[in-house]
Image (tube, coloured by chain):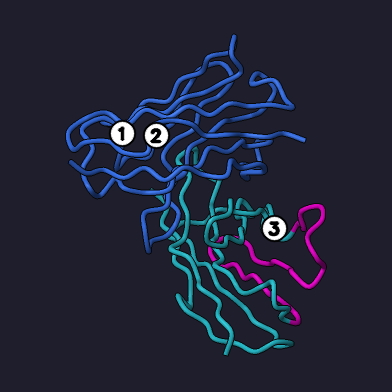
Chain colours: A blue, B cyan
Amino acid sequence: QVQLQESGPGLVKPSETLSLTCTVSGSSISSAYYWGWVRQPPGKGLEWMGNIYHTGSTHYNPSLKSRVTISLDKSKNQFSLELSSVTAADTAVYYCANVFDSSGYFQYWGQGILVIVSS
Amino acid sequence: DIQLTQSPSFLSASLGDRVTITCRSSHSIGTFLNWYQHKPGKAPKLLIYTASSLQSGVPSRFSGSGYGTDFTLTISSLQPEDFATYSCQQSYSTLYSFGQGTRLEIK
């Protein structure tokens, strides 16, 4: 069973960079088709942020593209999210998830981490 | 970008009811459409993938159909644990997207 766990600060100041890590267990990070980040602002729907392939190639949501970076650390079996220049609108529960194959569905998810952007 | 629009956004139903949620895509996406259930404080759960395939362990009262731009998720007989929010997601494009969600509540 693949397990994912998000970690990182729960409070980030406006204009700073949000950094989260997803630790993967039960599977090699080189085995999944994609690893991705999805967020849910309070009272709103799910928003796809971006995916990273095990080769390191990435795809990002165009609405976030200039601010988001996803990277892999194969030695630690982790992948990470950085979102720069955050505002209150970036307050959300952030989930990491894996895409099993080219069908593109998110099969396993982390429990999510609430990140609040506030001074 | 591919936009997904779900209807209704809110649905009130009773135990045992049959309910249908619709997801419409702005572009034809074949069967690259997936459905998730999510509840407050929990991770989203995959229900249906590639429009009509039931994820392992998901009760058979859940079913999906559709092709191209119009898709449906049907729950044949609502159970107490089914009251949640349901979201569709397209994976036709490398730039994924979700619908805005349908909140299903007890009448």
- Front-most of B74 and A4? A4
Q: Is residue A81 above or below residue B49?
A: above
Residue drawn at 55 percent across, 24 percent down: A53
Q: Answer yes or no: are tags 3 and 1 on the same subunit.
A: no
Please state which amino acid type lies under the numbered disc 3: Ile
Q: Residues within 10 Å of mark 3 (few under 14, many from 20)?
A: many
Please state which amino acid type lies under the numbered disc 1: Lys
- Asked whether the residues under the numbered discs 2 and 1 touch, taking CB atoms below 8 Å apart as contact, a structural biologist would say yes
Instruction: Give the magenta range.
Output: B53-77
Q: Is residue B84 above or below residue B48?
A: below
Residue drawn at 69 percent across, 26 percent down: A25
Q: Quadrant of the C terminus of chain B?
A: bottom right
Mark carried by residue A65: 1
Picture coordinates of residue A44 (x, y %)?
Answer: 38, 61
Picture coordinates of residue B30 (x, y %)?
Answer: 61, 54
- Asked whether the residues under the numbered discs 2 and 3 touch, taking CB atoms below 8 Å apart as contact, a structural biologist would say no
What residue is disc 3 on? B48
Helix, strand or loop under label 2: strand
